[in-house]
């Protein structure tokens, strides 16, 4: 849908979660005729005469029929989220009432909003740049203190401001080099190559740091994937239940009960951990169980951290060392965990000290707090400063990597003197890729891809 059509339409949608258990629902409109449309069905003060950022009590009516008593909040453009006239109607949270009110507003000229269309309008009208708009979706999806703080920092422009400064510095030199093209026959040099090289190196360093931050930023945004692995019947499902403090996985004394992965997440000190209970690793002729073992190995390769659990009453130290060797070869951090520690003597525990394990009793929920503390230490996220600019979006990383490649060509062109037109082309390419992040450069397909993932009403 073109920006021109969007600007002409007045849109409406439920802004609160549909089906949620709550007393109030909020219906949102945005567009040139938003206030006018609501005023036609609202019985109370004349909304057309009211100032921005005011709330008014009245009723929504279909002719003489009262649909509901409501509160109407006015945000007169450009002093609103979308920079257009915005009206929010707080109704009682009844599916019938919501449908009647939205239907009534559509009869008066509004149309149903598409996914993410309110935020798209905020972007198109200059209220947000593209990276800030994407951070809105991250903020809604945040489920931990860390992911919330990173999303909030990006939405408030931390990432955008840094990119803006980089672009401004590059634009300055690009304009000087473009000027040289106008005087090509006179062989003049307006852009000092040493200064340009210093600037490009500095920008290169900043962008590299942003790219490197993605690993941690992505973990903060999506959680830390932790695989619980081990042989069958060592207590993996019991451990998952103990960590979640609920009966999430089926527990049985029969080996091979877990044949597929079971996932759930908890929050530890503001960091989300996604625990994945897997099928026990062993040789088996059971086709379904074998498939589960194969998935276990795949999940282990994808994990950021592995909890390898074993039962000392089943395996000797030599067997455990052999199992750990396979985990060690993956090159992924892991925690060696001895279950049923409450059944071991002090002497038996000494036997396993060579493995530097943690001791727990999943059944009795002993040692779980110590395990959580070790998980935080292993991922080392507690030391991250979430006030720092951090990249959490793969689209941004890809654009930054392309920017880096263009800057490398700029540096090559300076060290191996090329004509100004080639140098200008590489700088323009760098600016193009930076512009893709903030939305200075966009396509309809890109916008559709980004905003279609938003919830309707946002």
Image (cartoon, rainbow, N blue to C red):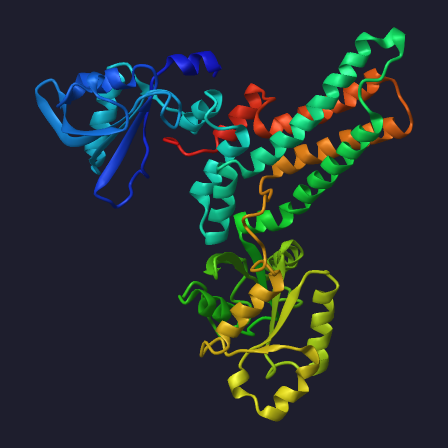
Instruction: Please give left or right for residue 44 compared with residue 124 in the image.
Output: left
| Residue at the image position 30 percent from the left and 28 percent from the top | 28
| Residue at the image position 68 percent from the left and 35 percent from the top | 400
Q: Is residue 91 visible?
A: yes
**Residue 273, horizontal then vertical, whole percent:** 52, 58
Q: Is residue 405 visible?
A: no
**Residue 194, horizontal then vertical, whole percent:** 84, 30
The residue closer to the viewer here, 343 or 134, is 134
> In the rendered image of this protein, does residue 452 appear above or below residue 384?
above
Q: Most extreme residue toward the right, as rendered?
A: 416
The residue closer to the viewer here, 318 or 345, is 345
The residue closer to the viewer here, 74 or 1, is 74
> Image quarter for residue 404?
top right
Instruction: Please give left or right for residue 408 compared with residue 239 in the image.
Output: right
| Residue at the image position 80 percent from the left and 30 percent from the top | 195
> In the rendered image of this protein, does residue 402 appear above or below residue 338?
above
> Image quarter for residue 449?
top right
**Residue 100, horizontal then vertical, whole percent:** 20, 26
| Residue at the image position 30 percent from the left and 17 percent from the top | 110
The C terminus - image quarter: top left
Tell me how many marks there are: 0
**Residue 72, horizontal then vertical, whole percent:** 22, 28
The residue closer to the viewer here, 367 or 177, is 177
């Amino acid at each position: 849908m073109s920006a021109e059509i969007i600007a002409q339409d007045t849109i409406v949608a439920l802004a609160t979660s549909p089906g949620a258990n709550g007393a109030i629902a909020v219906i949102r409109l945005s567009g040139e005729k938003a206030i006018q449309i609501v005023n036609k069905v609202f019985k109370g003060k004349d909304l057309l005469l009211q100032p921005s950022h005011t709330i008014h009590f009245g009723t929504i009516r279909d002719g003489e029929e009262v649909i509901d008593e409501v509160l109407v909040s006015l945000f007169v453009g450009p002093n609103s989220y979308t920079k257009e006239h915005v009206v929010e109607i707080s109704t009682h949270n009844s599916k019938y009432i919501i449908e009647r009110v939205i239907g009534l507003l559509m009869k008066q000229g509004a149309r149903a909003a598409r996914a993410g269309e309110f935020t798209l309008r905020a972007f198109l009208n200059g209220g947000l740049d593209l990276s800030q708009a994407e951070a809105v979706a991250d903020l809604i999806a945040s489920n931990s203190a860390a992911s919330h703080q990173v999303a909030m920092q990006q939405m408030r422009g931390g990432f955008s401001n840094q990119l803006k400064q980089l672009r401004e510095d590059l634009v300055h030199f690009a304009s000087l080099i473009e000027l040289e093209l106008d005087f090509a026959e006179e062989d003049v040099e307006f852009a000092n190559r040493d200064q340009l090289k210093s600037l490009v190196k500095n920008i290169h360093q900043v962008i590299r740091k942003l790219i490197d931050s993605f690993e941690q930023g992505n973990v903060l945004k999506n959680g830390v994937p932790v695989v619980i692995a081990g042989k069958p019947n060592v207590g993996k499902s019991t451990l998952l239940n103990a960590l979640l403090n609920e009966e999430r996985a089926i527990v049985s004394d029969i080996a091979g009960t877990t044949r597929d992965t079971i996932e759930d997440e908890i929050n530890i000190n503001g960091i989300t951990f996604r625990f994945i209970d897997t099928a026990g690793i062993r040789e088996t002729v059971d086709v379904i169980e074998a498939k589960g073992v194969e998935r276990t190995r795949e999940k282990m390769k994808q994990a950021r951290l592995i909890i390898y659990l074993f039962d000392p009453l089943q395996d000797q130290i030599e067997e455990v060392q052999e199992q750990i060797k396979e985990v060690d070869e993956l090159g992924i951090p892991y925690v060696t965990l001895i279950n049923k520690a409450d059944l071991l003597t002090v002497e038996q525990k000494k036997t396993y000290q060579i493995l530097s394990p943690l001791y727990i009793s999943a059944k009795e929920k002993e040692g779980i707090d110590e395990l959580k503390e070790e998980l935080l230490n292993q991922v080392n996220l507690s030391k991250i400063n979430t006030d720092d600019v951090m990249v959490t979006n793969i689209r941004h990383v890809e654009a930054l990597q392309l920017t880096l490649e263009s800057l490398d060509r700029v540096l090559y062109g300076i060290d191996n003197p090329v004509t100004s037109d080639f140098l200008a082309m590489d700088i323009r390419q760098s600016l193009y890729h930076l512009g893709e992040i903030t939305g200075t450069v966009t396509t309809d397909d890109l916008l559709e891809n980004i905003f279609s993932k938003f919830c309707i009403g946002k």
